[in-house]
Image: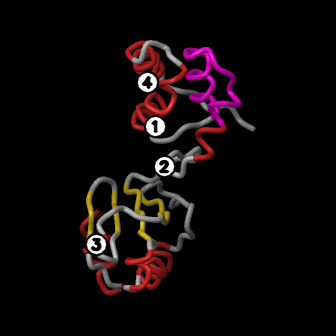
Amino acid sequence: MSEIKLAENKIKELEQVCTEHGNRPGELINVLHKAQSIFGYLPREVQEIVACKLGIPVSKVYGVVTFYSFFTMTPKGEHPISVCMGTACYVRGAEKVLDEFKRTLGLNVGETSADGKFSLSSLRCVGACGLAPVVLIGEKVYGRVVPGDVEKILKELN
């Protein structure tokens, strides 16, 4: 496993986040959320820093990171695309929308494009069932998406 070189300014920012949360183990999830927004993902090196600062075993940090689907240990693309597969979205055709993203981008769920521009994932429910099927791209919500919308959405991002 190769070592990732983390930017010194981002390490300092992470250490500051830990300090702001009192370096308390009970703040682990909050710290991990901030860490993921700083780095974009949670590689082993980031987990080790968090464990050290909060005084907990790396295995506990790893357990939390792997338990919650929001956290990722692989870098996401510049435009992370998440297709909701909750019940309302699924019955209204989310699977066909996901298939169209897979076909158009040449990616499977969990993959990032070689140029680092796009990553594709599915999630269970975003709580916007009235807009089903829903696609999240970064913080932006696209509602009532049909397969024919995929190309237009991707063009918007370029």
Tell me whether the residue at label 1 lies in contact with that at label 2, contact meaning CB atoms closer than 8 angstroms: yes
Q: Gap in Å between the C-alphas at discs 4 and 2?
A: 21 Å
Quarter of the picture holding the N terminus: top right
- Residue 6 in the image: above or below residue 105: above
Q: Mark 1 points at which residue?
A: 36
Residue type indicated by callout 4 = Lys
Residues drawn in magenta: 44-62
Which of the two discs, 4 and 2, labels the residue nearer the N terminus?
Answer: 4
Dominant SS type (magenta): helix
Spatial CA span between label 4 and label 3: 32 Å
* Mark before the other along the chain sequence, 3 or 2: 2
* Marks 4 & 1, CB-CB < 8 Å contact: no
Residue position marked by numbered label 3 in the rendering:
153
Where residue 153 appears, as percent x and y from the top left, is 28, 72
Q: What amino acid is at disc 2?
A: Phe
What residue is rendered at 61% in x and 21% in y?
Answer: 51
Q: Mark 2 points at which residue?
A: 70
Q: Earlier in the sequence, mark 4 or mark 3?
A: 4
Counting every numbered tag in the picture gives 4
Q: Do the residues bearing badges 4 and 3 touch, measured as CB atoms within 8 Å?
A: no
User: Residue farthest to the right?
Assistant: 1
Q: Which of 120 and 113 is in front in this view?
A: 120
Q: How is the image coloured?
A: secondary structure
Q: In whole angstroms, how far apart are the C-alphas of marks 1 and 2? A: 10 Å
Asked if residue 147 lies in the magenta stretch, the reply is no
Quadrant in which the C terminus appears: bottom left
Secondary structure beneath label 1:
helix
Q: What residue type is labelled 1?
A: Gln
Q: Is residue 137 left or right of residue 24?
A: left
Picture disc at residue 10: 4
Mark 4 or 1: in front is 1
Counting residues from the N terminus, which is met first, the one under dot 1 or under dot 2? 1
